[in-house]
Image (spheres, rainbow, N blue to C red):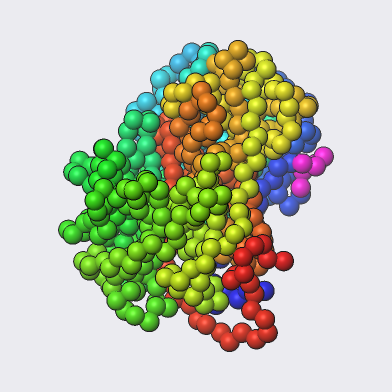
Amino acid sequence: MISDSVVWPRQAAPNRKNFLDHFSGASLEASRWVGVTSGTGAVSVTDSYVECNAPSNSAAFIYHPIKINTSVSQLWQICLDVHSAGATYPFVCCGLLNRSAGAPMADTEATNKALLRAWWSFGNPTGGLSALMHYAASGGGTETVWDKPGEAWGAVGAAKYAVQPIRTDDYYVVEIEIDGVNSRWRMLQKGQTYVSGYTFDQGDRRFTLTNWVSWSSVEASADLWLVIGQPYTNVAASRVLRVEWVRYIESNANALIEGWSSAKGTQATGHTLRHYWSYDGKVFVPEDRATDALVPTGGAWEGFDLQCPIVVRDGSGTDYLFYFGVHSGFIDSGIGVATAPTTIPQNGPWTRAGSNPKIATVANNTVRYAFVFKDHQEPDAQKRWKCVYAQIRTSDFKEEIRLATAPHPPDTSTWTLHGVIIPVGGAGAKDEFNCYGMAGVVYLHGTYEVWYTGEDASGTHLLRAFGPSLLSLTKDATDYSTFPSVTEALTANLTGRTVTVASTTGFVVDAQVLFDDDTTGDNYGTSRIRKILSSTQLELYHGLDGFLSGSPSHMRQIDGTARDGGQIVMRVGSEWWFYRVQWGAFDNDAGFGALCEQNMLYTHSGELPSSQAPLMDHAVSPIIPRGFNSDLRSVENMGLLMTPLDITQRKKTGTRPAPFAPGLAR
């Protein structure tokens, strides 16, 4: 086994309390759920969902048998389907109920609603079915609702809603995040239904993010329980709720895993840099709805687009945000840095270095895709900071990977350019066209590994180079890519959640799928596969509309995207995690042009990063949903907050493991 003392970068495994319950059995797991009914209500488990069937004047719900600990930072995600609802309001589909005298019980609306502190319901405030988010404020318990049009919490009103429109028999993901450090919470939501025909506002995307609410602003909430379903015994309308899965994520010791990503609204606009965090490294949520960490300046080298953010904490009270910027003509570019005093979370503000760019374009040779780290293993203090980046050659416009170094501090020091460290390959090589600097550096047993993106005529490939120094690297001949080409033309018009194609072979449950039918980058849709129905049909979670068989519209599983790159390779517990970005989903298909940039997670449990090819974690990818609040369409090129390379070497005996030998290890 690998000792953590010889591996960088690394982070602790996710909390052992975390779970994803997909209800794959025939009954509830007692350690996670208790079913409660009254009257003719029923709770059943079938077809990978829990059904809470509450006929007239009957209750049916489930609850988690462990009280919510609000001092612990956590995220709950509940994927649910309001399968049927007569008179839709009030229909409590999920909420936190405060009950000190024992566990939650079925009771009248007056009794149980008085105990609810934060909850989702489905209602009819503006003439169409909408999702509502509420909480019971302190000082008399006034019910407060999220007013998405006004982007604020306010009094209940006819024009206030969180998501609209929604419909029965469609799946949505509702979330509640609890910040244990700052004693506050907020609600989030993913998924929105179509109205009629194609619109961008449908499918698998984040649509709502509320403001934070302090627990001190809410009625007594020391005895909270998570309840899902209908807890009221005296509502005349019948309701059926289906719960497909529930994910619980708890932080380790209230620690955050922080990340930054490039984000843009349309194909024609440039990216800004935005801040996210996670409690497990798999599911990231945004800092807020609108704040950018950095935006283009309007000047030369960073006037249009900012990319590839990565933050390095120097351990002495300063954090450094590295990025590359591009002019609107995509000729002038550079790699810059901004600083901020160390805080948790690192919300900035960031101050750009006065001497930016630290690495600039020379003779139109565009520089980009920086991976920067502080290397305490480097004996030469003048090379303590290292930047692995890409530069395009003017002779043939091919891209190769280079190295620059600097002493501390990196924002005021001069960077020394060391030239090419990974050249473009020869004819027939997987990197014969380009070697992208969207690379991740690993330090293992005294060896540097650079995981980079190579490109040939077939697309991009996950490749590796290794050596005792970044200036002395050997290419590994193995292609570690796992990009199955799973693409099908629709053989019937898509309206709703059932897709008909010639073959469903290769499609995977829970995988995200993209739909496109033209070359316009901003026109496409995304959903997830709930079930493979037959050899020619599959069922989606989120219904879509406007994709026609005559176009013909195409559906592609996200792991079959033609373009892929990465920036972070990390040891997490006993696994290797590869944080990667996918873009250009239909670049290899003439007539299609969906701009869908998304950050993905690939993993494997081998001893070395090169032990095997990593596979996409479909249950969480994309790890940052598109959109903050029905706004941004794409996010890409994510970087994490990185600590310095500073590990303890231990004497090894026997044959050294093989990060050095090309090919897959045993």
Q: Please give the name of the residue rendered at 35% of the width and 53% of the height, measured from the top-left corner.
A: 391
Residue 240 visible (yes or no): no
Where residue 623 appears, x then y in whole percent? 53, 46
Can residue 300 be seen by looking at this rendering?
Answer: yes
Q: Nearer the viewer, residue 445 or 206?
A: 445
The one of 223 and 544 positioned closer to us in this rendering: 544
| Residue 521 left/right relative to 658 | left
Task: Decide if residue 398 is on the left or right side of residue 478.
Answer: left
In this view, 431 is above or below 35: below
The tally of labels here is 0
Tell me if residue 164 is in the magenta stretch: no
Q: Is residue 26 magenta?
A: yes
Q: Residue at x 43, y 37 (%)?
A: 634
Magenta-colored segment: predominant secondary structure: loop
Residue 441 coordinates in the image, percent (x, y) = 47, 64
* Residue 26 falls in image quadrant: top right
Span highlighted in magenta in the image: 24-29
State the residue at coordinates (51%, 17%). Answer: 198
Residue at the (38%, 31%) spot, across then down: 267
**At which x and y percent is residue 502?**
72, 23
Quarter in which the N terminus is drawn: bottom right
Give the image location of residue 415, x and y in percent: 26, 66
Picture quarter with the C terminus = bottom right
Name the residue at the right extreme: 26
| 524 relative to 657, above or below | above
Above or below: residue 121 compared with residue 618 = above
